[in-house]
Amino acid sequence: MKTTPVLLLLLSLAACGGRAAVPESPEAAACRSEARNSPAIGEAYSRMSGTNAMQQQAIRNEVAAAERRAFANCMRARGQSVPGGGVEPERLLR
């Protein structure tokens, strides 16, 4: 029965291990910063009211989509591949 503790140790170590974070390239870091400062994001946040939770969620979804688009456009303009593939995520209808 010595194998049981060893097996439990190996299983617990395997459960803790995940994918190692891939360091972001300088181009990706610059594009991510540029995307966060995109005019579309500022415009979307300017329409957010403080009381309507449904509107706030819709604006957050719009901001996330605008940031993804700006990041992808910047990466393409720099001749880099877009991480995660080229499929555009489904957008929720309002």
Image (spheres, rainbow, N blue to C red):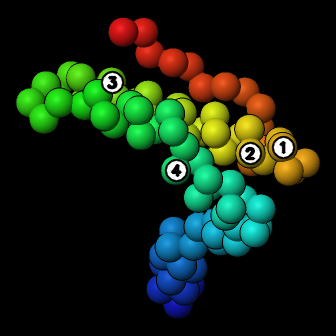
Q: Which mark is residue 37?
A: 4
Q: CA distance from mark 3 to mark 4?
A: 19 Å
Identity of the amino acid at label 4? Asn
Nearer to me, 59 or 34: 34
> Which badge, 1 or 4, comes first in the chain's sequence?
4
**Is residue 64 in view?**
no
Q: Is residue 43 visible?
A: yes
Numbered label attached to residue 29? none
The amino acid type, in three-letter code, at marker 2 is Cys
Question: At numbered mark 2, what does the secondary structure look like: helix, strand or loop?
Answer: helix
Q: Please state which of the two labelled residues, at mark 3 or mark 2, is closer to the viewer.
A: 2
Question: Which residue appears at 29% of the width and 28% of the height?
Answer: 47
Residue at disc 3, secondary structure: helix
Q: Quadrant of residue 30?
A: bottom right
Residue drawn where x is 51% and y is 39% of the image: 39
Q: Residue type at mark 3: give it.
A: Ala
The answer to whether the residues at label 3 and label 2 have Cβ atoms under 8 Å apart is: no
Q: CA distance from mark 4 to mark 2?
A: 12 Å
| Quadrant in which the C terminus is drawn | top left
Residue at (83%, 42%) from the top-left corner? 76
Which residue is label 3 attached to? Answer: 58
Sequence order check: which comes first, mark 3 or mark 4?
4
Assess whether mark 4 and mark 3 are in contact (beta carbons under 8 angstroms). Answer: no
Is disc 2 in contact with disc 1, using a CB cutoff of under 8 Å? yes
**Residue 52 % position (x, y):** 13, 25
Say if 94 sits above or below 46 in the image: above
Q: Which residue is mark 2?
A: 74
